[in-house]
Image (cartoon, rainbow, N blue to C red):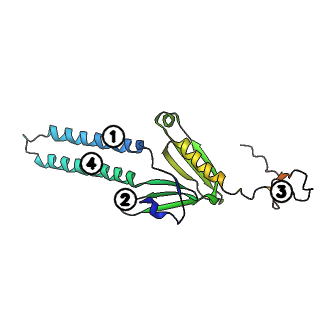
Amino acid sequence: MARSFLAPGEEVVRTTRKHLLVLARPALGTLVLIGILGAIGWFTGPQSTTDVVDQACGALAGLLLLRFVLKVRRWCNERILVTDRRIATVGGFMARRVSSWPYVRIHDLGLRRSITGRLLGYGTVVIEATIPGSAPLVLERIPDPNGFYRDVMEVLMEGPLPDMVEVDRGRDETDEAVARPPVDEADTGPLPRVVV
């Protein structure tokens, strides 16, 4: 399914989906609401003349269960792909959503893990773009976040180095090349100090 969105020659490094824990809250909410509806149906039992209430509670419980099944189906269809050229998210149940981040657009890659995430084996990966003002891509509740981070970094490091260093070619070839950061022509000096 998700491989149909790949370019010719593009290879998948890792395929994952969000952690199973993302279904815990909908499952718990569905169980609690079905329990409440069952209690309402029990107390207004069939011995009284309130069959309408029982039928309404049964219909609502069925709708809640259907809603949960659709959430599970959506979770099953969502994929996060790490390829040799980009990171892509593919999702959607009826309509497909595909978003992709080529590695040339990635400026920074971050990993956050809470205590709960460490215990249950998930984390948040934050990908910041090189385009100023663009919102970062936040991939929450990723299983095995250390492996995901490592795979993305390995692919990033295998590619060509970005043009961020300038090598001094004016020296003799026997001398060691010195790498210098690029000079910003529009640099206006240090930022002023802000007192809050």
Camera-side residue: 191 or 21? 21
- Name the kind of residue labelled 4 in the image: Leu
Between circles 2 and 4, the one closer to the viewer is 2
Camera-side residue: 147 or 132? 147
Which residue matches tag 3? 167
Which residue matches tag 1? 28
| Residue 5 appearing in the image | yes
Q: Earlier in the sequence, mark 2 or mark 4?
A: 4
Q: For the residue carrying disc 3, how many other residues have a C-alpha within 10 Å: few (<14), some (14-19), or many (20+)? A: some
Q: Is residue 173 left or right of residue 121?
A: right
Q: Is residue 163 left or right of residue 96?
A: right
Which residue matches tag 2? 93
Which mark is on residue 65? 4
- CA gap between label 2 and label 1 equals 22 Å
Between circles 2 and 3, the one closer to the viewer is 3
| Residue 133 appearing in the image | no
